[in-house]
Amino acid sequence: MKTRHLALFAFVILPIAGRLHAETFDEAMARASLDYNERLRKAADELNRTRERIASEKAPLLLRMRAAEDRLIAAESETTRFETAQENTAEQRRLLLKELDGVRKHTNYIATLAQESLKAFTDTFAPGEEQLVSDRVQSLHQRLDDIAAGPNGRAASDIADFLLERTRLALGGYGAKGNAVAAGNHSVLQGTFAFVGPETYFRPGQGGWVGTVRSRAGTPLPVAYELPAWNPEGAAAFFEGRSGTIFADVTGGKALRLKETSGSLWDHIKKGGVVAFAITIVGFVSLLTIGQKIRDLAQMGVDAPAAVEKFLRPVAAGASGEARRLLDGLKATTRELFATGLEHEDQPRAILEEQLQAVLLRQRHHFERRLPLLAVIATAAPLMGLLGTVIGMVKTFALITVFGTGNAGKLSSGISEVLVATELGLIVAIPTLIAHGFLAYRTQKNLSLLERYALRFVTAVRTAKARAGNEGSAEDREEPVPA
């Protein structure tokens, strides 16, 4: 390695040293100047060529740069235009959404008005009109209730057209075929309706009579009431569209509805429900019991004190034959008591009193029977009416929960059950209580008279025995005094 370095040094340095040694300084400077100028010339030529190349290449580059700048400016303009268009589109979308929201609100409002108008129309159907338009009304309701379709302005428009059509018909009056229920026999009749303002008239297809029509709850078929004063021949002209005389109900149907609500006694009881039937059964039991007790009271004949005194005089005088003869003139209950006394008048006083007491107990048991049942019925009937009241109130509140308070027809069943059950309970209880008080008083009064007559009979027998000389016997003195 060192040998190679030395050889290289010798190869480079030695020629330079020889030249330095051979040339002078001026020669070296002249040679260097020439060399420098040559190199400068070459560099200038190279620079010129480079400048020429740059100049030749600059123009296309400038054109390309200018085209690029133009494209950039166009792109910036396009971007600005797009941004402006986007902002305008967003603003337009916001305005459209706002307008759409307003349209939806108006459509919902119109749909609500249409639904309320349709409901108001259905609530004010003329009697018999429901069966004529029920299918179309139901179809319109279904279109309004279609949640998937959203607010249905077309349906609202159709409802408006329908209501306008019905209004035009109602203004001039019109006739239509339909069915009605005859008020007398409840048969379904086919015939012709005539709608004139608030009144509706019906003429059966077979003729014979003409009547006014009223709605019936729970069915689209109305009830047709015959108008006997309306001549069918004269009414035929009216139903055929010619001039004629009509009959108008000044009460607006209230008189007919009142007649329908009154109904029969059985219909009135049915309004009270199960409790009303139970109270009715209890009322029949009470009525039968009262009838039986009145019969018993009629059979419980007790003579007046004057007749009894007339009978007791021969008993006290010891004239038993005369007393037995007078016994047939007494009433049944008094006769039974004194017959038993005469039968045992020769017995000791204690036995006589026991026999008379046995008759009194038998009479009390016979004539006081079923009186406690009347007392129970008089007490239980108002409680049963109260039970019916509670059941009816529970039913009423259940109906209020389901249908609200706006539908009086739905609530009438529960209210009827409340009032009818209470009414029947009081109707049964009050007469039963009065009858029980009257019957108990009269029965107790007659039994008290019999007890009094029994004591008087014992006293008369003792008087007779005293006159016969038996008053001082020990057995008679030890007998207890009857209660």
Image (spheres, rainbow, N blue to C red):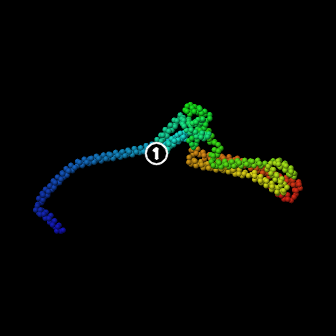
Name the quadrant containing residue 89. Answer: top left
Q: Quadrant of the N terminus?
A: bottom left
Residue holding disc 1:
149
Neighbourhood count class around disc 1 (C-alpha, 10 Å): few under 14, some 14–19, many 20 upward: few
Type of amino acid at the residue the image marks with label 1: Ala
Number of numbered tags placed on the structure image:
1
Q: Quadrant of the C terminus?
A: bottom right
The structure residue drawn at horizontal position 32% and vertical position 46%, both measured from the top left corner, is 78
Residue 277 falls left or right of residue 328: left
Secondary structure beneath label 1: loop
Q: Is residue 109 visible?
A: no
Name the quadrant containing residue 241. Answer: top right
* Residue furthest out toward the bottom: 2
Residue 175 falls left or right of residue 65: right
User: Vertically, is 278 above or below 121?
Assistant: below
Measured as percent of width and height from the top left, residue 451 is found at 80, 52
The structure residue drawn at horizontal position 62% and vertical position 35%, both measured from the top left corner, is 228
* Residue furthest out toward the top: 243
User: Vertically, is 3 above or below 432?
Assistant: below
Q: Is residue 351 visible?
A: yes
In depth, the one of 356 and 94 nearer the eye is 356
The structure residue drawn at horizontal position 58% and vertical position 48%, both measured from the top left corner, is 399
Measured as percent of width and height from the top left, residue 446 is found at 78, 50
Measured as percent of width and height from the top left, residue 186 is found at 60, 41
User: Vertically, is 6 above or below 35?
Assistant: below
* Residue furthest out toward the front: 206
In depth, the one of 95 and 479 nearer the eye is 479
Measured as percent of width and height from the top left, residue 323 is found at 85, 50
